């Protein structure tokens, strides 16, 4: 699968020029879910004592083994001394073990160094022993002191070796945990992006479906208004023509006319009713125009019919985002637009729309009671600056350094994923820009997005 190949390639690139020669991942049943040796995927490791210690007891364990032939990241190798480490994967939220990492590190060179050191020590010990044998009677106390010194040196070397091996294992564990965190954050971001794409497709479909009934409804209402105008004119003419006949005597042989006062009353009332009907239809037309405006802004917001990267006027796309945001923001929060003329910007419009909408919604949610969110733009020719400022509660000093961290949120459980600002920060960074935050507790917060104009190259 493409996703597996990409992951496998990233792992191999990360482990290049490293002592780590193989990585395996097991689930809680002991099944190999991933291995840099593809042939081992699917093997059952549940009976291995070190796997049991890591999976069921949540403890790391290691063992040293010799392999005559071994399929490593660098290819097939022979006669290697390896240290196999089993590391439990801990869910940071539940603190439960969700899987096991197995990391093989090549320690052949380290063992060769130990063996060489041991050989040197033995040679030195033999030489010393020969000297001690010849001088045992004269230098017994000196020999004993020398022996103790060599034993201390040997112990020190062993301690040093243990520290080196421990450092290797800890470094490998840190690399694996960091890659796991990055992989999880990437998956979450891809999922969020997919959700935004599906939402955009749904909105575009709804907008497309609404366009046709809106068009013929507007046309029919407009025709009805015109017909009522013509009818009002015809009734006026009829009223003027019938006035003499109603007021004068009847003609022999003609049908009897209604009572003059009844006809006059009906004719007098009809123009007012027609005007009232016209006013009602005018209100309908106004509602249809508002629906048209909403459809146009929804289509502009999704931009599914545009190129992935295009040159756009950010003032126009910001207007669409503000219009969409106003539909869900409480009426007690006022959204103000302060736009200045901007140069065209080559960017991923849908991605920046996601950033703008997220920041505007966050700003509105930070306001408890009446308040204002101000969306402004400016440019110095080299950079475009979009500022979203609110009059909300501000961000505390202990929270501010963590607002762009994945999964960090101050919202109640179930109301926020903690990925909105992290994804926004990544999107702006990929466009070559940056986000600057200014806040004052109790007064409000300002997010300023700065994007380069000429050198902007979105990934």
Image (cartoon, helix red, strand yellow):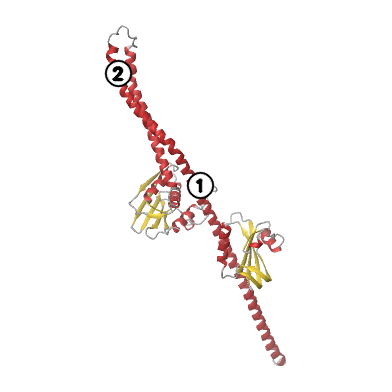
Residue that numbered label 1 is attached to: 198
Q: In the image, is 61 to the left or to the right of 258? A: right
Residue 82 rendering spot, x and y as whole percentages: 65, 70
Query: In front: 122, or 382?
Result: 382
Residue that numbered label 2 is attached to: 239
**Which of the labelled discs sits on residue 447, or is there none?**
none
Q: For mark 2, does the 10 Å Cα neighbourhood hold few (<14), some (14 to 19), or many (20 or more) residues?
A: some
Disc 2 to disc 1: CB gap under 8 Å: no
Q: In the image, is 208 to the left or to the right of 30? A: left
Give SS at disc 2: helix
Q: In the image, is 50 to the left or to the right of 340? A: right
Query: In front: 179, or 348?
Result: 348
Residue 302 in sight in this render: yes
Q: For mark 1, does the 10 Å Cα neighbourhood hold few (<14), some (14 to 19), or many (20 or more) residues?
A: few
- In this view, 317 is above or below 450: above
Give SS at disc 1: helix
Query: In front: 144, or 415?
Result: 415
Residue 45 rendering spot, x and y as whole percentages: 69, 61
| Residue 277, picture quadrant | top left
């Amino acid at each position: 699968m493409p996703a597996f190949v990409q992951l496998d390639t990233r792992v191999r690139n990360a482990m290049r020029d490293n002592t780590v020669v193989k990585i395996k991942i097991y689930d809680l049943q002991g099944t190999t879910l991933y291995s840099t040796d593809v042939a081992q995927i699917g093997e059952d490791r549940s009976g291995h004592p070190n796997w049991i210690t890591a999976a069921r007891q949540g403890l790391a364990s290691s063992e040293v083994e010799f392999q005559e032939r071994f399929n490593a990241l660098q290819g097939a190798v022979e006669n290697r001394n390896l240290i196999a480490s089993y590391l439990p994967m801990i869910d940071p939220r539940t603190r439960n073990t969700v899987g096991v990492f197995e990391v093989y590190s090549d320690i052949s060179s380290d063992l060769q160094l130990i063996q060489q050191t041991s050989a040197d020590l033995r040679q030195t010990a033999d030489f010393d022993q020969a000297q001690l044998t010849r001088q045992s009677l004269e230098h017994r106390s000196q020999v004993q002191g020398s022996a103790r010194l060599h034993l201390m040196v040997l112990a020190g070397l062993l301690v040093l070796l243990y520290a080196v091996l421990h450092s290797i294992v800890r470094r490998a564990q840190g690399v694996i945990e960091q890659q796991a965190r990055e992989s999880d954050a990437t998956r979450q971001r891809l999922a969020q992006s997919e959700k935004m794409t599906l939402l955009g497709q749904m909105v575009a479909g709804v907008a497309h479906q609404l366009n046709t009934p809106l068009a013929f409804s507007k046309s029919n209402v407009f025709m009805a208004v015109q017909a009522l105008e013509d009818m009002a004119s015809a009734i006026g003419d009829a009223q003027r023509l019938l006035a003499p006949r109603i007021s004068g005597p009847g003609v022999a042989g003609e049908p009897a006319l209604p009572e003059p006062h009844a006809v006059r009353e009906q004719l007098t009332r009809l123009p007012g009713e027609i005007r009232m009907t016209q006013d009602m239809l005018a209100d309908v037309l106004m509602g249809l125009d508002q629906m048209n405006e909403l459809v146009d802004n929804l289509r502009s917001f999704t931009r599914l019919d545009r190129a992935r990267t295009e040159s756009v006027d950010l003032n126009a796309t910001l207007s669409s985002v503000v219009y969409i945001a106003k539909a869900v923001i409480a009426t007690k929060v006022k959204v103000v637009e302060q736009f200045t003329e901007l140069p065209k910007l080559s960017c991923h419009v849908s991605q920046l729309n996601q950033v703008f909408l997220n920041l505007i919604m966050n700003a509105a949610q930070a306001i408890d009671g009446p308040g204002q969110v101000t969306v402004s733009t400016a440019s110095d020719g080299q950079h475009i600056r979009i500022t979203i400022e609110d009059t909300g509660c501000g961000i505390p000093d202990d929270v501010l350094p963590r607002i762009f961290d994945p999964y960090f949120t101050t919202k109640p459980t179930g109301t926020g994923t903690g990925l909105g600002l992290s994804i926004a920060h990544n999107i702006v960074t990929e466009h070559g820009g940056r986000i600057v935050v200014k806040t004052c507790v109790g007064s409000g917060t300002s997010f300023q997005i700065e994007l380069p104009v000429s050198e902007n190259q979105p990934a």
